[in-house]
Image: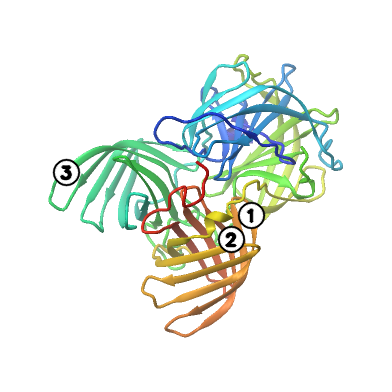
Amino acid sequence: MSRFAMTKTLALCAGGLILASSAWAQTTTPPHAEPEPGLWAFDGELNGQPGRSLQIDTEQGRALIVSYLGYRADGSSVFLQASGLRGGDSSAFRGPLQEFRNGPPVIGGGAGNGEVAGSPGEIQLAFDSPTSGTVTLPGDVTRRISRFTYGLPTGGTQYTLQTYSTRLSTTPAASYRVELRDGNFLMSQLTTSDGRLCSYSGTYQKRGQGIESDGTASCVDPSGTQQRSPYRIEQFAVDPYGMATGTLRKDGIESFFMGACHAGAVMLGSPGTCASGSSPSDIVVQPGIWAFDSEVNGRPGRSLQIDTQNGSRALVLSYLGYRTDGSSLFMQGSTANRDTNAQFTVPLTEFRNGPVIGGAIRPAEVASTMGAATIVFDSPTTATITLPFDTPRRISRFRYEDHLVRFNKAFSAQVYPFWSPTPTATSIDMVVRDGIFRMDTRTADLLTACEYRGTYRLSGEGLDSDGTRTCTAPSGPTSEAYRAEQFTVDRNGLLRGLMQSASGARTLVLGACWNGRLCTPPELELPR
């Protein structure tokens, strides 16, 4: 087992979800810090030894699920879970931690329903960024936590980024050169749409899926006047397709950028972006809580926690289940590489004698190794898992929020051919309701217009759609089947998704809800 898998683990019971209200208000700037879903570590316990951890899951809404993976006084492993609703703009959560028992008895056993076995008290979480915060466990002191990180920063040096902000009436694009060297972050703006050029210099650290940087921005306007001000960049990341995203806070303005990372040298047949996937057919797995499809019945049960970083090559798997005596347990394993573009093999290990809530910090030890689990993904949110000594079972990303209202908007977007850094500016009008998916697109030059008509299904944080695309263009009309995967609109109104036509052409859609500026939370109908 790799070191990062042995260092932290976590768990959850996704068979049923009981939501309780959250009653804590964030009073500092920024007003909302949305935690990045995945494994979170206790900062003072990262020592290369097995220990405990948290699994935090959100789906860009008000609901939050947190699982605590730790140990009982007798040394055995246990998972506890809390779930509930946060205030509309709250960066904190609180709720009772619950223990479960008597769920599906053992791996390979029959189905069953768990029950609440009790609660040691309340857990409190407060986030100061998407990848850092504090936790207060029942009867314990407040401790710092951060998104667990095991992948190296990926990407290149040159980017073309589109900027979206509630304070900007345009969506300016610019090219940048980015260098990460010896802990220092350097970003220089190479082109501009408004005559203003900025450079950024500071420190950075890798956190979860991306990097964070704090430092000083130096900007020069067309008259030559220079202005210096502090900046903060969060979740600057390059996905396996070579698409970059991030958040920039400067001069009291929060801006979101999306665009392409350019490959340093393009060889015949290779991608023009900084794509980290080894194949166009690699499935990019959505991290979070995954449920056993046949066991989702509204009652407590068992679940899986899947975390991926570094272009989805590495994967950490946590299994939350039960022993033959009815007590809950967690097992965990990891792999640094996938077997194929869709398959991972992960050994599952149980640990014991780690830290007890409120007790001394101490490393855990291996209790037993169950065997290997094999997961074969057929989409980012669906798969088949074969646990040790068990039959294959269908699993899917656990879905507990519905954000369809965010899709029924007008969007300003950039559409990229797969693995290409050159987009087409496109306006999008979308209507998604009552099982019907309708999307109308028009390129900025008004030469090509397409109509997408089909059905949709909710999937993980977004939706998938199948139907027919009909286009008019200078080359003539066309009509063919399409499939849209992982179309999401986050709480900031940012749109992204993958589109594939029957002819095999694939495009990436990056954009934002736009009505002369980035849509505001009330326009997105988000609770305040």
**In this rendering, the label closer to the viewer, 2 or 1:** 1
Q: Which residue is mark 2?
A: 485
- Which residue is at the far top? 360
Q: Which mark is residue 459?
A: 1
Q: Which mark is residue 226?
A: 3
- Which residue is at the far bottom? 476
Image quadrant where residue 436 sits: bottom right
Going 43% across and 53% down the picture, which residue do you hit? 519
- Element under disc 2: strand
- Element under disc 1: strand
Q: Please, is residue 474 above or below residue 28 in the view?
A: below
**Residue type pointed to by label 3:** Gln
- 490 or 358, nearer to the observer: 490
**Residue type pointed to by label 1:** Ser
Q: Position of residue 42 (x, y in %)?
A: 55, 26
> Is mark 2 in CB contact (under 8 Å) with mark 1?
yes
